[in-house]
Image (cartoon, grey):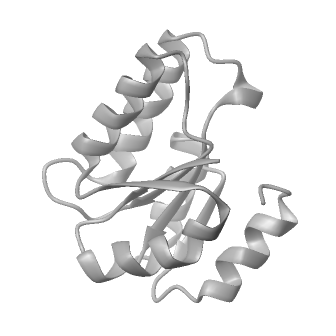
Amino acid sequence: MRILITDDDENHLLLMQSILAPFGDCDCASNGQEAVDAVASLLQEQSTYDLIFLDIMMPVMDGQEALRQIRAKEKEARVEPMQQSKVFMTSALDDADNVWEAHFGGLATGYFVKPIRPSVVVRRLEELELI
C-alpha cells in the first residue's frame, strides 16, 4: 500500500508515520502544494496513492485546496472513482464547515480531529477495509 502523509507539524508527521508504516510505504509532505505535486508525479507514472492524510491548516496551500486539486488531477488522469485515493483530513478544527467542505467539497473519505489516537485511526481503516 502506498500512503502520503501531509502535515506541517513534524511531530504529527512522525506520529502518523508510526501508525501507518506497518501497513505500507509512507511518503511525507509538509504542505498542500507538496502533496499535490506528489500525487501528480504518481499519476504521470499511471499510479496513485492508496491512502492520503491531509492536515487542513498548512502553509503554502491548505488541505482543503490540496484535496480539491488532487481530485481534479485524478479526474484529468481519468482515474475511476473506485480507484481514487482514499483521503482523510486531519485537523484541530472540528467545526461543521470544515467537516462539510472536506466531505462534500473534496470528497474526503474521512476526517480525524487532533489529537489523533492511533487506535482510532487503525479501527477506522479496518472498518472501511482499507487495511
Residue 51 on image: x %, y %: 59, 50
Query: In this rendering, would 61 be left or right of 120?
Result: left
Quadrant for the C terminus, please: bottom right
Q: Is residue 64 above or below residue 20?
A: above
Residue drawn at x 76%, y 29% is 82
For image coordinates 66% across by 62% down, the residue present is: 23
- Residue at image location 78% in from the left, 77% down from the top: 123
In this image, 44 relative to 129: left or right? left
Of the pair 108 and 30, the residue shown nearer to us: 30
The extreme left residue here reads: 60
Q: Is residue 94 visible?
A: no
Measured along the vertical axis of the image, is residue 30 above or below residue 72? below
The image shows residue 75 at horizontal and vertical percentages of: 54, 16
Left or right placement of residue 129 versus residue 110 in this view: right
Q: Is residue 17 above or below residue 100?
A: below
Q: Nearer the viewer, residue 125 or 17?
A: 17
Q: Residue at x 57, y 77 (%)?
A: 19
